[in-house]
Amino acid sequence: MKPKSFVGMRCSIAGALELIGDRWALLVIRDLSLGLRRYDDLRASTGIPAATLAARLKHLVEHGIVERVRYQERPPRDEYRLTPKGRDLWKVSVALREWGDRWDATGFGAPTVEMVDRETGRPLVLALVDAETGVAIPRDHAQFRPGPGADDRTRQLLNQRTGAAR
């Protein structure tokens, strides 16, 4: 059974999920972010079936998240690299890792990877940051409001949920 498409839904999360594809694609993006480039390396790292990996890479290339680059002519060999659009997904990966660590999503009791400051070695976490000042903002200060692309349904949902102004 093919999953329902999110195309045309007025939701950035749904649109992003449509472009990314599925959980296998997120693991491919994770590994490309960590420096893997070649098909066999991606397959070995994730354990993904060959046909599934080929389909996910094709999907990611078609949506401009990954680019296919020839590194050898004879025999022809390609590697895969994240585009700027794909590299922008690093925050999504970090958020999923932080959530998985906090709630022990692996069941192994401890994180396998930590994000630290390259210079100090201190742990880093994602934060909401004021776009003008660069100051971190506590979650309880954050609120959603309708954006320029909002339709009536979105406005109604946000007004009902948060009391946001029309």
Image (tube, grey):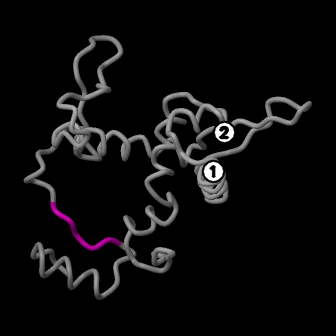
Image quadrant holding the C terminus, namely bottom left
Q: In this view, does 42 lie to the left or right of 30?
A: right
Judging by the rendered image, the residue that carries numbered circle 1 is: 57
Q: Earlier in the sequence, mark 1 or mark 2?
A: 1
Side (left or right) of 13 relative to 61? left
What type is the residue that disc 2 sits on?
Tyr
Residue 88 drawn at (x, y percent):
47, 44
Q: What element carries label 1?
A: helix
Based on the displayed image, in which of its 4 quarters is residue 23 positioned?
bottom left
For residue 125, side relative to residue 66 (left or right): left
Q: Which of 64 and 38 is in front in this view?
A: 38
The x, y position of residue 35, in whole percent, is: 55, 28
Q: At 15% from the left edge and 44% from the top edge, which residue is drawn?
A: 137
Q: Position of residue 72 (x, y in %)?
A: 84, 29
Q: Which numbered dot is residue 156?
A: none
Residue at the spot of label 2: 80
Magenta stretch containing residue 144, yes or no?
yes
Q: Give the range drawn in magenta.
A: 143-147
